[in-house]
């Protein structure tokens, strides 16, 4: 009996680790929908192509220096901050990438999409969701 319980415990831990690895892999290669504020304020949801960005920049640029949490929906991002050069606006400033004047390049999601990860091991690009 004791033997049985022990091996069950090990299996559970292994399953949890697999789950964690799986989640991270999906997030690295998928698209992320951000819609905590956008639709409430009359804009389409934002589609952030995680994969597209992730192959161009190291994780720490966004997840340390720019303070994006590694959990979708947990960073409080708003348009004022972005326009002032924080979060997406640190790069979308006309130098590293096109400016925040291009509303329609970020706010491309279909109405009604909720914040979360969409897609699998590829990016599908703006406007697809
Ligand atoms: C250009 C910026 C950027 C880069 C580079 C980047 N990420 Fe992200 N990542 C984000 C944003 C934005 C979110 C969503 C954060 C939020 O909603 O609060 C996110 C979310 C995540 C999540 C959470 C997904 C979920 O399911 O909740 C994980 C895990 C993650 N990133 C891992 C990585 C790893 C690993 C790398 C490097 C290989 C990386 N990111 C590179 C911007 C970036
Ligand atoms: C580089 C990408 C990007 C561009 C370009 C952009 N936005 Fe946003 N915007 C965001 C993100 C990310 C959020 C927060 C998403 C969420 O959680 O709803 C946001 C949120 C908003 C919100 C919600 C209310 C608030 O105060 O945050 C409004 C309104 C908004 N944007 C309007 C605009 C307008 C108008 C433009 C063009 C002048 C624009 N955005 C351009 C990324 C962008
Ligand atoms: C570390 C720099 C950096 C950050 C932070 C960043 N971007 Fe970008 N982004 C880029 C670059 C560089 C490009 C490519 C620009 C080009 O091709 O002219 C790009 C392209 C894009 C594209 C077009 C990608 C495609 O799939 O065709 C979208 C949409 C976009 N960014 C949205 C966002 C949003 C939304 C955020 C914040 C959640 C964000 N970006 C944060 C650097 C960044």
Image (spheres, helix red, strand yellow):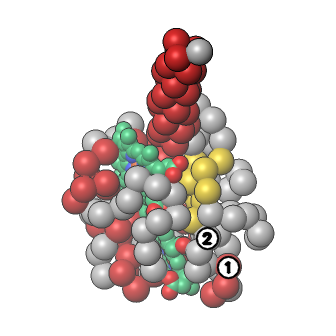
* Residue topped by disc 2: 35
Q: Can residue 94 be seen in this view?
A: no
- Residues 66 and 89: in front is 66
- The answer to whether the residue bearing label 1 lies less than 8 angstroms from the nearest atom of ligand 2 is yes
In this rendering, would 96 be left or right of 72? Answer: left
Which quadrant is the N terminus positioned in? Answer: top right
Quadrant hosting ligand 3: bottom left
* Residue topped by disc 1: 39
- The answer to whether the residue bearing label 2 lies less than 8 angstroms from the nearest atom of ligand 2 is yes
Residue 83: image location, x then y, percent: 37, 80
Q: Which residue is drawn at 25% across and 48% down?
A: 60
Relative to 12, residue 43 above or below = below
In this rendering, would 61 be left or right of 45? Answer: left
Which quadrant is the C terminus positioned in? Answer: bottom right
Q: Is residue 39 visible?
A: yes
Q: Is mark 1 on a helix, strand or loop?
A: helix
Question: Image quarter for residue 32?
Answer: bottom right
- Residues 2 and 55: in front is 2
Q: Gap in Å between the C-alphas at discs 1 and 2?
A: 6 Å
Residue 46: image location, x then y, percent: 59, 66
Q: Residue at x 52, y 25 (%)?
A: 9
**Labelled pair 1, 2 in contact (Cβ < 8 Å):** yes
Question: Image quarter for residue 107?
Answer: bottom right
């Amino acid at each position: 009996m004791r033997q049985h319980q022990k091996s069950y415990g090990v299996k559970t831990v292994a399953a949890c680790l697999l789950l964690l690895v799986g989640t991270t892999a999906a997030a690295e290669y998928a698209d992320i929908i951000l819609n905590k504020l956008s639709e409430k304020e009359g804009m389409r949801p934002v589609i952030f192509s995680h994969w597209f960005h992730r192959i161009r920049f190291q994780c720490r640029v966004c997840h340390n220096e720019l303070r994006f949490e590694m959990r979708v929906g947990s960073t409080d991002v708003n348009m004022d901050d972005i326009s002032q050069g924080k979060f997406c606006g640190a790069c979308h400033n006309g130098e590293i990438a096109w400016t925040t004047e291009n509303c329609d390049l970020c706010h491309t999601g279909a109405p009604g999409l909720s914040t979360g990860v969409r897609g699998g091991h590829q990016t599908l690009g703006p406007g697809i969701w």
